[in-house]
Amino acid sequence: LTVRLGVHTGKGHGELIRETFGTRWAWISVGGLLVTCVGALITEFSGIVGVGELFGISPVISLGLATAFLLSIVYTGGYMRVERVALFLGAFEMSFVAVAIYAHPKASVLINQFMSIPLGDPDYLYLVAANIGAVIMPWMVFYQQSAVIDKGLKARDLRVARWDTAIGSLVTQLVMGAIIVASGAALAQPKTHGSALNTVGQIYQALSPALGDQFARIAFALGVLGAAMVAAIVVSLAAAWGLGEITGYRRSLSQNPRQAPWFYVVYTLAVVSGAATVGLATNLVALNIAIEVLNALLLPLVLGLLLALALRALPAELRPRGIYGATVIVAIFLTSLLGVASGVIGTV
């Protein structure tokens, strides 16, 4: 829907909400965007710090290097260059698939545990909400529609862009499944059962006995670093684009800092604030999970506005209808319901 809205209206998500439903709804949506962006950056920078700890690098150095890289890549390149760098970094996430295979999971155990999901456990439902919030995030909706505009995609590109989205969705779920399988297989080992998992370093220590020290260190580090850096780029750009669509300042990677000063200021503030928060925070795993649960609780607002835009802002012949329209509505309703219900029950 974000791609369809972008290519057919030529406007970003926030700008389209403002024009279609008014300034109040636009600020509400962007307010949620900025909150989740800061939360997401905390998640990504905590992963970067954890990778640094695996190799004896202090958090200050890890955060400093990551911040410098994120600023330099955006300040010195247009959209296509930034996208290529992100794709290169994201490719490292496939190392998690190798980690899952190397963990030698038993098919019988996978099937048995899949058939006995503890839906009556509030702690489990809290993690369900976190997983939903980690998959469908407000900043992703803003980012994709804004990226379509900055990339210059037109209506003729819709088919290819839909394939791009579909393949990306499948690959990311493959990675997520690999992480769950690898972690489950490793943490089921007697030596790791009951291990504390409050930092990325502790997660690595729990995985090491089952995976082998050197392999676990390199594969896990590459996967986390690739995922964290890609998401940090996307999140920061989403914040800069989204706020610009509401306030009206220039907002394109094709413009340099002199031409679009506020765009780069907001991007810089997002990166620096995320790094600074992680430098002061403790128990980052618990904080990360809480952030993803917040994303799940915001789903009715985020997906509801997305659907409303598709039904109002698109030309009549392009709006979701028939089987496709029914599928979209049911998917959005069930996803929002599951995210909110799991988050509320798990929190209470």
Image (spheres, rainbow, N blue to C red):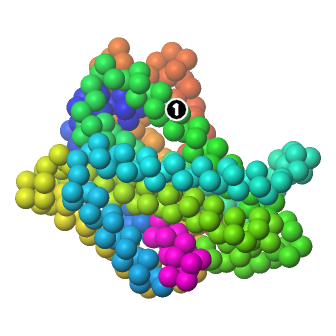
Q: Amino acid at mark 1?
A: Ala
Residue 14 image point, x, y percent: 27, 46
Report the magenta residues as a range: 43-57
- Near mark 1 (Cα within 10 A), the count class, few <14, some 14-19 or many ≥20, is few
99 left or right, relative to 45: right
The residue wearing badge 1 is 166
Query: Quadrant location of the N terminus?
Result: top left
Question: What residue is rendered at 53% in x and 33% in y?
Answer: 167
| Relative image position of residue 23 (x, y in whole percent) | 21, 48
Report x, y in % for residue 282.
53, 84
Magenta span includes 54:
yes
Q: Secondary structure at mark 1?
A: helix
- Is residue 142 something that shows in the picture? no
Towards the viewer: 188 or 298:
188
Please tell me whether the stretch drawn in magenta is mainly helix, strand or loop.
helix
Nearer to me, 124 or 120 = 124
Left or right? Give the position of 260 relative to 180.
left
Residue 55 found in image quarter: bottom right
